[in-house]
Amino acid sequence: MLKKILLVIVSILVLAIVGFYIFVQASWDKKYDWPGPALKSSTDSTVIARGKYLVNGPAHCISCHVSGFDDLVAGDTGAIVPLQGGLMFTMGPLGNLYTRNLTSDKETGLGRYSDEQVFRMMRHAIRPDGMASMSLLMPFWKMADDDLVAVVSYLRSLDPVENNVPEAEWTFMGKAIRSLSPTFKPIEKPDAPAVAPPMAATIERGEYLARYVANCVGCHTERDMMTYEAIGPEFAGGMEFEPWPALHKYLGADTTLWLRTPNITPDINSAFSKFKTPQEFITRFRQGRAYAFSPMDWGPFSRMSDEDLTAIWMFLNNLKPVAHNVGDIVFTKEKK
């Protein structure tokens, strides 16, 4: 009798494992045929200049869409480097991602895609091939129409650079997470505004930037590092970044050092609380990074306007204080 029970249990487990494997293989690369927004890129110089500010400033495209560490560091210090993509991000047990070529190259860059495909990618997190992208890393679904047009118009104006970037390399675990986690699902109804709040020192402008352009909320919120879903209060910090050995070595940094994002709500003990005035906040951003290996996009953010940085300070200062002690910002973990 016991053997029969064990056989049934084992059979159920095998069927469950096989069923899950089939489900993952059939769904991880699901295609979506949703239409993109009815937006068109522009050749107007004013629109392109606005896009240049966003790409190299608050939207920080220059922090990822480069080919290697030389351009990553150069872009961080203010140089305009080719956004040809190819930089590899290791996602631990999920696999490897490669940033895409954003130049106007018609074979390997954005030049091969229509406006509808590009705007759909940014608004709905759907790649040109129909697969969902990782919306947390490209959180522009609520970027206003006029800003979206400005960004794409600037990217269309870039000189073409031929760079055929490899496709992402997903492990089975990565494919399973893609199949199950909302983080890897497209944004069906983004409800984005047509016009961005004007560049002025207002809470409205600050919230728009902190949530939908600079993406402060993406990193300064504790997240499950397998699914990237939020597990802590917004803006209260606690997200952990494991060492990126190749970058740490390139920068001459200790490869055992982790980083944890600070609490940026106006709690009395938070990192944000030390900035009593907008000017103190602006001064800190103008100084750039304190840690060479910090994942914070200090370079692009340091080039934001005084009005935009003041607006972000006003928004953060208006948040409900959250008492969340995240611990040391720089730390090490014992190997298991």
Image (cartoon, grey):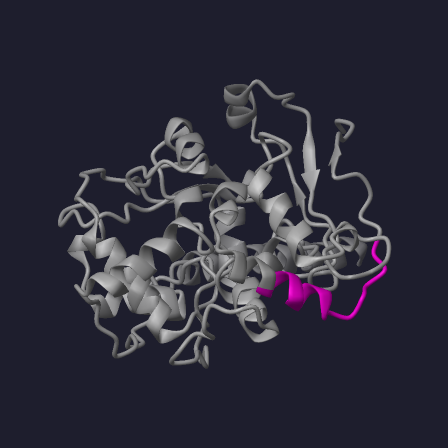
Q: Is residue 69 toward the left or the right of residue 252 in the image?
A: left
Is 139 a magenta residue?
Answer: no
Q: In this view, does 52 lie to the left or right of 335?
A: left
Quadrant location of residue 316? bottom right
Instruction: Classify 174 as above or below 142.
Output: above
Report x, y in % for residue 324.
83, 56
Q: Quadrant of the C terminus?
A: top right
133 vs 225: above or below: below
Which segment is the magenta one?
311-324
Residue at 53 percent of width and 44 percent of height: 297
Res. 227 visible in picture? no
Quarter placement of the N terminus:
bottom right
Q: Can residue 250 be seen in this view?
A: yes
Q: Residue at x 30, y 43 (%)?
A: 83
Which residue is depicted at the point 17% across and 54% down?
111
* Image x and y of residue 220, in percent: 66, 54
Task: Identify which residue, 323 or 8, lies in the foreground.
Answer: 323
Image location of residue 334, percent across then percent down: 78, 28
Instruction: Give yes or no for residue 320 being in the magenta stretch.
Output: yes
- From the viewer's side, name the closer residue of 305 and 334: 305
Residue shown at the point (19%, 59%) measured from the top left? 113
Task: Tell me where residue 201 appears, x and y as whole percent.
Answer: 56, 68
Picture quadrant where residue 52 is located: bottom left
